[in-house]
Image (tube, coloured by chain):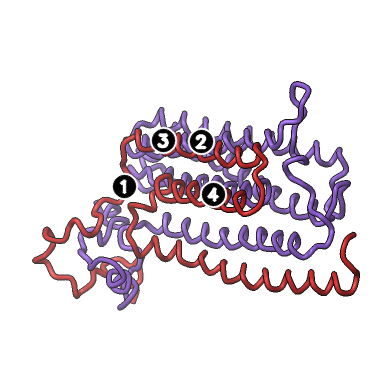
Chain colours: A red, B purple
Amino acid sequence: MAEATANGLGQHPQNTGHAHDAATASVAPAEVHQEHPIKLYLVVWAWLFVLSACSYMVDYFGLQGYLRWSLILIFMMLKAGLIVAVFMHMAWERLALSYAIILPPILVLVFVAMMVLEADYTLLTRVTFFGSGP
Amino acid sequence: MAETTLTHIGQTEPRPAGWQGIATDWSSDQRAFKNVSWGKAMMWIFLLSDTFIFGCFLLSYMTARMSTRVPWPNPSEVFALHIGGSNVPLILIAIMTFVLISSSGTMAMAVNFGYRRDRRKTAILMLLTALLGATFVGMQAFEWTKLISEGVRPWGNPWGAAQFGSTFFMITGFHGTHVTIGVIFLIIVARKVWRGDYDIGRPGFFTSRKGHYESVEIMGLYWHFVDLVWVFIFAFFYLW
C-alpha cells in the first residue's frame, strides 16, 4: 500500500507496452519543462496590448448596445485565451490536465443562466410592487 | 537521479489521442496528470477554485445590476480622470490594465529564463514583475481614495444604484488582495532564485528539489491568473 500510493510512484501502467515507445513519442509531450523562444512571449505581449487598446477604444468611442457588448466579449475571450494558452502554457500541457481545468469553469455558464432568470424575476416583482423608476 | 524520476514519472508513456487518452489517463488506478508535477497540478486546482470564487463575485454583480430598478452608475464617467482640461473616460483603468499585462509579459519571460538557468535575468524580471504589480496596487489605492472622497460607499453612492459601491469594493478589493499576495510571493521566490536556492537544492520552501526551476513557473501561473481575472473584471465591471 505504502509504495503504491507514495506520490503515485512506481505506478507505471501495466497496460503500456514497450514496443511503441518511439513510435508514439510524439503523441505524449515527453518534456515537462516549458521552453519556448522569447519571441513568442513578446508577440503575445504585443497582441495583449493591441487587444486591450481595442477594448478601451470600445468605451472611448462610446459604442452602445449589442455592438459594444459583443466587442467587449470578443476582446475579453481573445485576451483570456492568449494568457491561458501561451503565458500559462496550457497549449502544451497534457490534454487530461487542460480539460480538467478548462471544462469546469464552463459550468459557471449554467449558473449565469439561472441567475439571469432569477434577476429578471426579481426585477419583475420589484416593478410590479414598487412601480418602475426610482 | 532519484528525485528527478520522482517528478518526471510517466513521461515515456504513450497514450491514445483525444477523449480516449483522457479516459485512459483518468482510469484504472493511475496518476492522472502524468507529466505534471504535484506542485503545478495543485496550483492549477487552486486556480480553478479561485476561478469559481471570482465567478461567483461577478455573478452576484450581474444579478444585482440586472435586478435593480435604479439606473446603474456609468463606469465610463465614474472612472474618468480630469486631464488637461477635459475628462478622459476610464483612463486610469486602461493604464492599470496595461501595467498588469506588462507584468504578465515580464513574468512569462522570467519563467523562460528560469528554465534556461539564467538566475540573474530570472530574478531581475521577477522583481520587475513585482514592481509593476505594486504599481497596480498603488493605482488601485488611488482609485479607491478618489471614489471614497466622492462619496462612494458600500451602501450607496451619488450616481445611482446602491449596489455599485458594494460590488466595486468587493470585486476590486479581492482582486487587489490577490495582487498584493502575488507581489509578496514574487519577492520571496525572486530572492530564492537570486541566492541560487534552486541550484543547490537548499532545504526550504519548495527549494529542496535540486535544479528545479519549476517553482518559478508555478509562481507564474498564479501571477498570470491574477492578470486573467483582471481581464474579466475590466470587461464586465468597467466596460459593460
Q: CA distance from mark 1 to mark 2?
A: 27 Å
Q: Badge 4 is on which residue?
A: A76
Q: Is residue B210 above or below residue B32?
A: above
Q: CA distance from mark 4 to mark 3?
A: 23 Å
Closer to viewer: mark 4 or mark 3: 4
Tell me which numbered mark, 4 or 1, is placed earlier along the sequence: 1
Closer to viewer: mark 2 or mark 3: 2
Residue B233 in the image, given as x and y percentages of width and height: 63, 50
Tell me the subunit letter for badge 3.
B
Q: Badge 2 is on which residue?
A: A49
Query: Is residue B206 in sight in this rendering?
Result: no
Tag 1 and tag 2, C-beta contact below 8 Å: no
Badge 2 amino acid: Phe
Q: Badge 1 is on which residue?
A: A33
**Secondary element at tag 4:** helix
Q: CA distance from mark 4 to mark 1?
A: 29 Å
Q: Residues within 10 Å of mark 3 (few under 14, many from 20)?
A: many
Q: Badge 3 is on which residue?
A: B109
Q: Residues within 10 Å of mark 4 (few under 14, many from 20)?
A: many
Q: Which residue sits at x=59%, y=47%?
A: B230
**Secondary element at tag 1:** loop
Tag 4 and tag 3, C-beta contact below 8 Å: no
Residue B116 in the image, given as x and y percentages of width and height: 32, 35
Q: CA distance from mark 2 to mark 3?
A: 16 Å
Q: Is residue A66 above or below residue B213?
A: below
Q: Are marks 4 and 3 on the same chain?
A: no
